[in-house]
Amino acid sequence: MQDSSPTVEPLDWLDAVRWNNDDLVPAIAQDATTGDILMMAWMNRESLALTAAEGQAVYWSRSRGKLWRKGESSGHGQTIVEIRLDCDEDVVLLKVEQAGGIACHTGRKSCFYRRLEDGTWVSVDPVLRDPDEIYGANHGGGHHE
Amino acid sequence: MQDSSPTVEPLDWLDAVRWNNDDLVPAIAQDATTGDILMMAWMNRESLALTAAEGQAVYWSRSRGKLWRKGESSGHGQTIVEIRLDCDEDVVLLKVEQAGGIACHTGRKSCFYRRLEDGTWVSVDPVLRDPDEIYGANHGGGHHE
């Protein structure tokens, strides 16, 4: 026999994640090419399973209480390059290809566009595309789609 | 008058952070030079204030219920290059210089050393230094110092 390894249940890797009291895990999205950190959002078990199965980032929207396929209204989806887990098994890292080069609902590359300078948060990254153009003028913000 | 801007309370920037129900915020540490994501830990208001004031990463250890000056036992401190805040004001990003090039208590560069491959988490990054050497042989793991 070439392979005598025991059969592995297909969802064992999801059991290895230490879900928090709300059954969620934080997921950091990083641009696989530039290394830029794009955003952090949350995943439940179903969204992480779908992310791996579909190869597209699917989060859990805490505010809306439902699955959130990144890009479903913005077109700015995230194609999965790698999924990583940290030493505590309680944070997931996604290396992604960011469609449109825009992850943030404000039309910026990254959600981390404010930098602390002399005791003030200062916006230092440009808006690449008007949110009205991304979501339509009556989008109500488009936040977390 | 050269400067007619209103007086800013020195801690306003801390009030801008949306602390969670446990009065914490997740903080992602990124290597400022390589862009590698090193770890994610948590901060309370005091630890974020200290991080900015001292220019060294200070987290809140949830397991020990106390401030955790990164590197206090490992020597692997993190010097702050930038502090950023995301669009929701509920995640902090630290760009840091990582002492020793090792952020993880396992002796690896990054805590995100496991990659999902064919439904299994596989360790793909090398141990750069034996944890026994970092923390001493009787360290009990050194986890979160």
Image: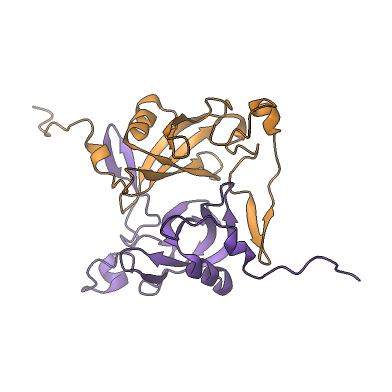
Chain colours: A orange, B purple
Quadrant for the N terminus of chain A in the image? top left
Q: Considering depth in this image, is A57 or A67 the residue closer to the camera?
A: A67
Image: B75 above or below A114: below
Left or right: B102, with B55 as reference point? left
Q: Is residue B78 visible?
A: no
Q: Position of residue B90 (x, y in %)?
A: 52, 52
Image: A108 above or below A121: above
Left or right: B122, with A110 as reference point? left
* Residue sitting at x 59%, y 56%: B84
Image: B47 above or below A14: below
* Residue sitting at x 32%, y 38%: B116
Q: Is residue A124 visible?
A: yes
* Residue sitting at x 36%, y 45%: A25
Q: Position of residue B31 (x, y in %)?
A: 51, 56
Q: Considering depth in this image, is B5 or A70 the residue closer to the camera?
A: B5
The outermost residue toward the right is: B1
Q: Considering depth in this image, is B88 or B57 the residue closer to the camera?
A: B88
* Residue sitting at x 64%, y 27%: A135
Q: Position of residue B86 (x, y in %)?
A: 57, 49
Quadrant for the C terminus of chain A in the image? top right
